[in-house]
Structure formats: C-alpha cells, structure tokens
Amino acid sequence: MSRILAIDYGIKRTGIAVTDEMQMIAFGLTTIPSDTAITFLKDYFSKEKVACVIVGEPKQMDGTPSQSAEIINAFVAKFKVAFPEMILERVDERFTSKMAFQTMIDSGLNKKQRQNKALVDEIAATIMLQDYLHYKK
C-alpha cells in the first residue's frame, strides 16, 4: 500500500505528517520552510509511495475562509501544477493548532519546548491527518 500525507501549510512554516503504509497511524514527519514545500514533496514522492495528499483548509467559526486561505489556495494551485496526477483533498483545519498546543501541554512539555512553533505545526498536521483517517473509515 501507500501512504497518505498531510500538509499544514503556513506563511513561514509547513507541518507535514504521514501515515504508515497501511494507512492506520498518523505521525509527524517534519516541519519545513513553506517556500521549500514543492521541492521537499518532489523529493519525498520520489522515495515513498503516496496515494493521497490532504491540505488544511482554514475557516473561521462561521465557515467562511480565514485570512490565510488565499496563501494556502496559491500553494494548492502550485501543487496541482507540480503533481497533476496526485489526489489532493482539502480538510477543515479549524482548531488544529490549538489542539496541537494542548497536546504539548498534556504530554508534559515545558514552556520553552511549547514555544517551538515548528513542533506545533507538525503536531497540527498529525491531528489533521488522524482526524481524516478517523472519518474516512
């Protein structure tokens, strides 16, 4: 089988999570500078089989697009040009960063460790992917 990859795209940083090959468990892969995302993905896709990519869709509480939607939509357009054969799905990413921060607190990370925004992005991508797997069943 092949993996599912999740992208929590941001202005500066992008969190990336993947599943195991059986698509049962989501885990954080890395956080990269956002301007290197397409290059990173080309390299990753050359090494690993990926069946589907999910990208967060930022929404406000009323369901309208958030401020960062324009930036993420521009990335999605570049992604589709670079990887026209890849299946791409959008998923609601509301609260994933807050949930990631709470996960860091719950796992006992100290204040300095919780200030690591790259880790927050990676955990947010993992939460988004785990939710996707849960609802896909």
Image (spheres, helix red, strand yellow):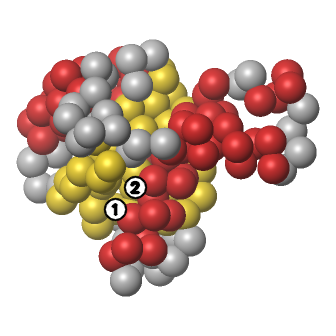
Rendered-image quadrant of the N terminus: bottom left
Splitting the image into 4 quarters, where does residue 34 fall? top left
Direction from residue 84 to residue 113 in the image, left or right:
right
Residue type, numbered disc 1: Val
Which callout, 1 or 2, points at the residue further toward the start of the chain? 2
Which residue is pictured at 81% across the width and 50% down the height? Answer: 106
- Relative to 128, is 81 on the left or the right? left
**Residue indicated by mark 2:** 5
Instruction: Give the Cα separation between the discs numbered 1 and 2.
Output: 7 Å
**x, y percent for residue 92:** 32, 49
User: Are the residues flagged by discs 1 and 2 in contact, CB closer than 8 Å?
Assistant: yes
Pick whichever, 80 or 114, lies toward us.
114
> Badge 1 is on which residue?
50
In percent of width and height, residue 17 lies at 50, 51
**Within the image, what quadrant is residue 43 found in?**
top left
Rendered residue at 53%/54% (across/down): 127
Would residue 45 be seen by someone viewing this image from the given angle? no
